[in-house]
Amino acid sequence: MSETVSIPSPVFASPEPARRGSSDKWRFTGGFLAFAVLSGAAFYMAMSVLVPQRLRDIGVENSTAVLGTINAAGSIASIFIALFVGALSDRTATRWGKRTPWIFCGAFVYGICFWSLSRPVSAAIIGVVYVLALIGLNMVQAPIYARISDQVEPASRATVSAAIGAGGVIGQGIGTLVGSSLIEHMELGFICAGLCALAAGVLSVVIAPREPSNTDMPKNTGEPLWKVIVSSLTPPLKDCADFYRAFICRTCLIVAYQMVFSYQLYILQDYIGQDKLSAAASIQVISVITMIVSIIASLVAGPVADAMNRRKAPIIVACVFFAIGLAMPWIFPTRMGMFLFGGIASFGYGMYLSVDQALNVDVLPNKETAGKDLGFMNIATCAGQAIGVVITSALVSVSGSYVAVFPTAIVMTAIAAVSVLGIKRVR
């Protein structure tokens, strides 16, 4: 980032994107799809399979609680880094544009951290490295999502959002499939996760249209850093009711999602009653199901939402599917119940993610601070991840069972649906 000029002021404006050709639309779609698939593969390969099993292999007692603590610490750290990087990327001036340098640096940190877990380490070191990995991930995510506001036409945003959403769920399927296949070869698994994390950021920039240089933008090098920090930590305060309704929707759905998906391996072992290898085989099947239904959801939800100019209806339908999927292991505590969960819930979650980023951009209070405000929206992701794993950890610690996890997650999904119904600016 040697090209970065001292922090400027005022914030660079992000005007409504100029009309672009269809080739640019599909290049953005391809670039963000590559990011979402590879980043999701890296994350879920490590945190849904390899890290949980590593904790048990090194003899960690109450690994469910330890995994929850690690996830919660990483999510809390992510809240601040997403806000700070989002605000700084609004203000960065380089010949590569204001977002690209952050994407490259974040991808490097993200990849190196997952690679470094390829050697057996203690639970404390796993926790520290995971927090650093999430810092790298948010250095990539915050500026990438802000590019939707900067460069993608409103009429194409749901399609691009669908690429991100479906790509993330497909990446989850690939990651858990590869991770469970390498559960007895963890060193290789963590190396694969690191390479995917690095490639995610690099390919997102290489495939998508180049971000224009902004070195000629007006700047004032005299603004002190403390003002930037205060600005980055100031939430949207004006004309922002719909923004916070979308925030609540995302938070609650991610809480519900993390309550189950982060503990798939443990649920299969402790709730369904499978051993290590049988659970790994079941995760492989769930991963394939997830990828198939996610592709179907993305082909349906994103383009249809753009064609109908609707955001809310697809999300409501997605919540219904997700709630039904969550009920399956609760009603049928069997391997088949988890397969049904993987298929139905992943279809619903894939539908939601296909429209999620488009909705978030559409409800931004101020396009000129898209990076900062989308950084605040990312708090919903980070908080949802932290709250979800804490709720599951607490429920299991108190009751000694995963039974209560599923109805609790269904309640969170219902709250998400109610909150999105209240949005007025977007249909």
Image (cartoon, rainbow, N blue to C red):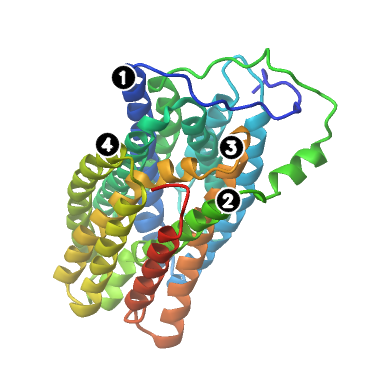
Q: Are marks 1 and 4 in contact (CB under 8 Å)?
A: no
Left or right for 380, reference 280: right
- As helix, strand or loop, the secondary structure at mark 2 comes to helix
Give amino acid for label 3: Gly
Q: Which mark is residue 78?
A: 2
Q: From this viewpoint, is residue 197 visible?
A: yes
- As helix, strand or loop, the secondary structure at mark 4 comes to helix
Q: State the separation of the CA atoms marked 1 and 3.
A: 25 Å
In the image, residue 355 lies at what x, y percent?
A: 35, 45
Residue that badge 4 annotates: 307
Residue 394 vertical placement versus 371 (above, below): below
Q: State the separation of the CA atoms marked 1 and 2.
A: 34 Å
Q: Nearer the viewer, mark 4 or mark 3?
A: 4
Left or right for 273, reference 228: left
Q: Which of the two discs, 4 and 3, labels the residue nearer the N terminus?
A: 4
User: How crowded is the residue under tag 2: few (<14 C-alpha within 10 Å), some, or many (20+)?
Assistant: many
Residue that badge 3 annotates: 371
> In this view of the protein, which residue sits in the foreground, 116 or 241?
241
Q: Are marks 2 and 4 in contact (CB under 8 Å)?
A: no
Q: Nearer the viewer, mark 1 or mark 2?
A: 1
Q: Which of the two discs, 1 and 3, labels the residue nearer the N terminus?
A: 1
Q: Which of the two discs, 1 and 4, labels the residue nearer the N terminus?
A: 1
Q: From this viewpoint, is residue 274 visible?
A: no
> In this view of the protein, which residue sits in the foreground, 304 or 131?
304
Give amino acid for label 4: Ala
Q: State the separation of the CA atoms marked 2 and 4.
A: 34 Å
Location of residue 206 (image quadrant): top left
Give amino acid for label 2: Ser
User: How crowded is the residue under tag 3: few (<14 C-alpha within 10 Å), some, or many (20+)?
Assistant: many
Residue for point 50% across, 39% down = 141
